[in-house]
Amino acid sequence: MQLEGKVAVVLGASASGGTGWAIAEALAAEGAKVVVAARRIEPLQELADAIDGLAVVCDGAKQDQIRALSLSAVEAYGKIDIAINCAFFAGDGLIGDSDQDTLQTSLDVNFLGHVHFVRYMAEIMNDGGSITLISAQAAAQPSLGAFAYGCAKAATDCLVRYAAVEYGGRGIRVNSILPGPIKTSTTAPFLDRFDVNEAFMEQIPLGRLGLPKDYAQVVVWLAQPGFISGVNLPVSGGMHLNRIPVYRGFAQSD
């Protein structure tokens, strides 16, 4: 077990079978004690019970709750070695249709929440720890209908570089992952549509959609001692070499 004796915090892990869920399972499988957090306690507790971890209610947009999450982890396990923030708010829509509430929520969850997460996790984290933020391919490549999400995540990718410099003296590594399309039980009905699937297959050199386990494997790798910091890492099956499909249905609901 590569993470035996380590303590990890995963924020945004309440969707059964989703990316945060898979990351928590993978960290636990490698021997880490895992604190899982999200706004919904019921599914979160199910995950915590399955991995022998701790469930903590936390809104990824609330500064005081993120600080309380870090303190809960230390109170339960005495330290923090690894921290991952998977929380996000999609906020679909076009620039011309945007409203202040959607813009503010996207900023609060997709950028400011990550600022608070890095601050409070690093404040308590052991030297030599690892912080990984889940960004989005839309931060680097325009995706029609996802401008608020993509712009906020782009700010988070910039945060990664600043944080890597600020906390590097303590050996804390800060990175982000830019996922391509992720197939989960929630997204499958949309991604399995022929027109949508075909559009993505034209742009993904590896010829398949990403699965939660693909991103969990990368997080486990980044959580181990290493020499990588300040990197915004595409994990997209190579889609970052092409483009996110331009398909107007992505910006609309059925």
Image (cartoon, rainbow, N blue to C red):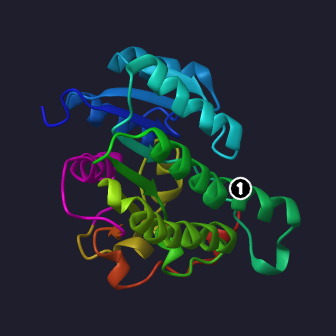
Looking at the rendering, the stretch of residues picked out in magenta corresponds to: 208-230
Q: Is 110 or 77 nearer to us in this picture? A: 77
Q: Which residue is mark 1?
A: 108
Provide residue 223's location: percent of width, then percent of height: 27, 47
Instruction: Judge from the rendering whether residue 200 lies leftward or rightward of residue 159; answer left or right.
Output: left
176 to 95, vertically: above or below = above
Seen as rendered, the residue at the extreme front is 169
Secondary-structure class at tag 1: helix
Q: Which residue corresponds to the image point at 69% horizontal and 43% vertical from the top-left?
A: 63
183 to 124, vertically: above or below = below
Provide residue 211's location: percent of width, then percent of height: 33, 51
Provide residue 189's location: percent of width, then percent of height: 51, 50
- Residue density around tag 1, few if under 14, some if 14–19, many if 20 or more, within 10 Å: many
Q: Which residue corresponds to the image point at 40% horizontal and 40% vertical from the top-left?
A: 125
| Magenta-span inclusion, residue 185 | no
| Magenta-span inclusion, residue 216 | yes
Q: Quadrant of residue 174?
A: bottom left
Q: Quadrant of residue 51?
A: top left
Q: Quadrant of the C terminus?
A: bottom right
Q: Let me know if residue 179 appears in the view.
A: no
Q: Is 75 or 2 nearer to us in this picture? A: 75
